[in-house]
Amino acid sequence: MNNKLLLFLFLLLVANHLNATAHKFLIVEKDLLQVKKIVKRYLLTNGYKIKESDDKILEIYFDTPELLYLKQNGSIRFKALEYLTKKKKRVKYHKTVEYSYDNNASFVYPVKHYNSVKSFEEKHQLLSLVKRKEREGFLNKLKSDGLKYPMRLKEIVRISKIKHSFEHNITNTNTGRIAINQMRVSALESEIEFIMLEIITKNRAIVDDLKEIVGTKDANIKDTEYALVFEQMKKNVDLFYWILRYPYLVNLLYALGFGALGLLIIFALFSSFFRNTNHMKRD
């Protein structure tokens, strides 16, 4: 391989990197209105045309007991996007199952609810939601990516969020989207709330600029929403990781702990009883 070819391949790699779309998720320690003002001022000051929109979304993330998709920078989620019908203005939901693995492209599968159960998979909380015509392809995709037993998938976290988005462009060329999300995350009977900034852009300088402006540390920046949400739950909910990863062991330790506490109480009661009995005999 000659030097010219090597140089060409290097320049091609650099060009692909520069043209690639950055997709980052950031934790923001500021209030919602303040973040909206910061983002809007930044985009307008830098010459972007913006279009704002609001959405209400429900998401449920699933993973294996070993947290396969968390480790592989992927995710499987059920998503319900709220919308109003045009004529009667009724609230309805656009529902999908979305899957990505190793930070690659996402696959979207339609959802349909059925009144009867016709297969083993239809007893599963997630697999039953995928439209029957699409389900075999969905299962084959999961298995080809290393998930041998899809029935082992379980719910990890449930998210209710309000998303305020800024579509931004220059000279009518779409550059990307910045979304400010009010997050309410629940799992294991615990609930936390926080503000998350989602940035999708071909201009990587936007990520660096906003990270500095809103004061987000590198540790609070993730490549997937699932990874960021999981990390927040891990920080704020005691034993969150261990209960998800080893539920039976944690339950056993709790049982042993309560058992030991019960024995101590019984021992204390009997000790007190015998002391009182001996004292009465002396009298």
Image (tube, grey):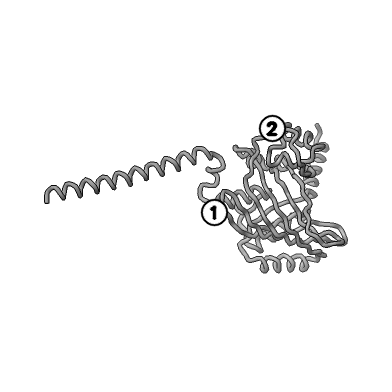
Name the quarter where the N terminus is drawn: top right
In this picture, residue 62 sits left or right of residue 135: left
Q: How crowded is mark 2: few (under 14 residues within 10 Å), some or many (20 or more)?
A: few
The residue shown at (63%, 57%) is: 184
Given residues 232 and 177, the one toward you in this image is: 232
Disc ID at residue 236: 1
In this picture, residue 202 sits left or right of residue 267: right
**Residues at discs 2 and 1 in contact (Cβ within 8 Å):** no
The residue shown at (68%, 34%) is: 150
59 up-or-down from 130: above or below: below
Given residues 248 and 6, the one toward you in this image is: 248
How far across and down, in percent of the image, does residue 157 sit?
Answer: 63, 48
- Going by the numbered disc 1, the residue's amino acid type is Asn
How far across and down, in percent of the image, does residue 17 sit?
Answer: 77, 47
N-term-proximal mark, 2 vs 1 = 2
101 up-or-down from 45: above or below: above
Please tell me whether mark 2 sits on a helix, a strand or a loop: loop
The residue where tag 2 is placed is: 146
The residue shown at (64%, 44%) is: 155
- Going by the numbered disc 2, the residue's amino acid type is Gly
How far across and down, in percent of the image, does residue 30 sit?
Answer: 62, 65
For marks 2 and 1, give the CA distance: 31 Å
The residue shown at (20%, 50%) is: 276
